[in-house]
Image (tube, helix red, strand yellow):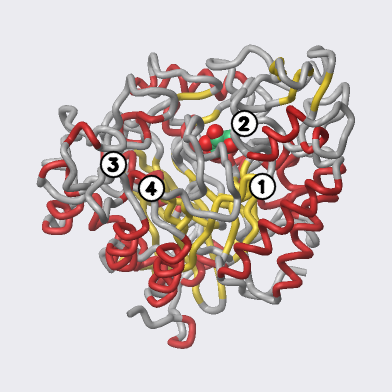
Amino acid sequence: MTAKNSWWEGAVIYQLMPRSYADGNGDGIGDFQGLTSRLNYLRWLGVEAVWLTPVYPSPLQDGGYDITDFKAIHPELGDLAAFHRFLTAAHEHGMKVILDLVLNHTSHLHPWFQRARWAPKGSTERNVFVWSDDPNRYTEAPVLFRKFEDSNWQWDSVAEQYYLHRFLKHQPDLNYENPWVQEEMLGVLDFWLQKGVDGFRLDAVPFLYESEGTRCEGLPETHDFLKKVRQRVENSGRDVLLLAEAIQPVDEAAPYLADDELHGAFNFALTAHLFAAIASGNCKKLRQCLQDAQTIVPGCRWALPLRNHDELWLGDGHLVPEDVIQSIRSGLPGGHGHWLNWGINRRLAPLLNGDPRANKVLHALLYSLPGMPCLYYGDELGMGDWPGLRDRDPNRTPMAWTSARNGGFSSAPEPLLVLPAITSPGYDYRVVNVEVQKQLPGSLLNWHRRMLTCRRLLPALRLGSFEVLESTHPSVLVYSRCSGSMTVLIAANLSGAGASLQIDLSKWKGSRTREVLWGCEYPVADENWFVYLPSFGFSWWLIGEVEDTDVPSVD
Ligand code: BGC
């Protein structure tokens, strides 16, 4: 059973790519030394957990998701001692650390794969991966990286067989039918648990097993293995988050959240509906998605991302219907011409045409909906991207810290940087950076910090119950969060035009109402409560009086 009030319930997660965050040794590549020195920023911002994309040795053909050693640190990032120093410092700053755990595949340069190619056909060593003489198996499984691959099978001239790879051909799929694989990968989990990690994002978790005639996603055997993963975590006796990356509709993602399986899962359907709502100015389907997600798995176990290090994955009509995909493609001008595999390859700010109001209203939702809000590094600044870079690199450029050379990310000569710092008009690091925005009271960065402070002061937003309320305006989403004596009412206008509407507050009739961010008084609640929200405007209101015991102290 889920422990009561685990650290991760409703926690604000900050996702970063260590190679692009802060360079401590001046070689142009972000590392643990640099990251450790930036923990004070993350604490100042008010996030509670840091999720690091893969930190393991890798030839980096897929951003580190192609791993050659699961129990070590990529030498460019540091070593296990540097990781330990980082983890200890993060804990001292009151922050949790989540690692990416890539169970589905290795790099083709992993010693297991090299051994498998040369091992006799049918041997245990060969069967660490999924081989076939016929590349026409599992044809219903879509090719995920279709911009780069045209099949899920690759011929290996040494093995004289095809091997399965759901991602790049450089990432052969492990064979979970082989008990050796299961034990080894559970050993990887134990290794990092013993190091003191607080959580794992389970990468590409639906694809562990295959079965003919299916999409090869979320098969019963996959769930059986994930229950073993959960058992290992339980055995550790620690409160450790297991978070599924399953890009599936909520009803298909929900089984990962069985009581004896994983604790959380990203709600990628919700992400798509959020973008569709802002692209079309209509929140009908967003409302439905929210209600479905809460009916299927109530509470705060859905992780809520806007953008991440991948494309904005919309899929082939399976995750969300075609008309939702179309409304995003036609309604977000910043997305035109940036389609990658199954989604739009842009960062948040350019997708929203650089409009900070749109950034704010979407985050105001993330920070007040039930779940774990996930903030992607740089989105708190409205950082831009570099279209034209390889694969998903446009979204993975160095964090902008200051107006100094390389945005203060690194002291290395510019050509040595892991990726170029952003200098495009409107997003130039000399303007869009932490140092400048810290000094401007009205900056996006200070807005994010303020919102996160308010969230901490309003425990109803973290763990409270959730109810979608009727809205008389198609562009405005209205809901309440309640816990103890605290009720917070939220309304958000997802359209570029102002909206006036009536909200039925009869169940709180006669109660005092106050806007949270600015503290101003509103008329007392009644059945015809009237509000106006400007374009992309939102408000959080406190309804009624709150007892002192329900208000936490914030340091
Ligand atoms: C990660 C991607 C990665 C893929 C293969 C994912 O879903 O988020 O960045 O390319 O898994 O590991």
Check residue 76 in the rendering and tell me which mark sits there, or answer none.
Answer: 4
| Discs 1/3, front | 3
- Give the structural element (helix, strand or loop) at label 2: loop
Please name the residue shown 60% across and 44% down the image: 267
Query: Which numbered disc flags the more N-terminal residue, 1 or 4?
Result: 4
**Which residue is rendered at x = 50% and y = 64% of the image?**
11
Residue at the disc numbered 2? 108
Q: 10 Å neighbourhood of mark 2: few (<14), some, or many (≥20)?
A: many
Quick check: 485 left or right of 495? right
The CA span between labels 2 and 1 is 37 Å
Mark 2 residue type: His
Comes first in the chain, label 3 or label 4:
4
**Quadrant, the C terminus:** bottom left
Q: Nearer the viewer, residue 29 or 2?
A: 29
Q: Quadrant of residue 126?
A: top right
Q: Tag 3: Cα neighbours inside 10 Å, few (<14), some, or many (≥20)?
A: many
Tell which of 372 and 206 is nearer to you.
206
Which mark, by number, is residue 398? 3
Find ligand 1 in the image and state its quadrant. Answer: top right
Identify which amino acid the numbered label 1 is placed on: Ala
What count of labels does the image hold?
Answer: 4
Residue that carries the numbered disc 1 in the rendered image: 293
Secondary structure beneath dot 1 equals: helix
Circle 4 residues within 10 Å: few <14, some 14–19, many ≥20? some
Query: Which secondary structure lies at badge 4?
Result: loop
- Mark 3 or 4: the one toward you: 4
Mark 2 or mark 3, which is nearer to you?
A: 2
Q: Where residue 233 sits in the image (x, y, percent)?
A: 71, 66
Q: Contact, CB < 8 Å: mark 2 with mark 4?
A: no
**356, 226: nearer the viewer:** 226
Q: Secondary structure at mark 3?
A: loop
In x, y percent, where is residue 246?
Answer: 66, 40
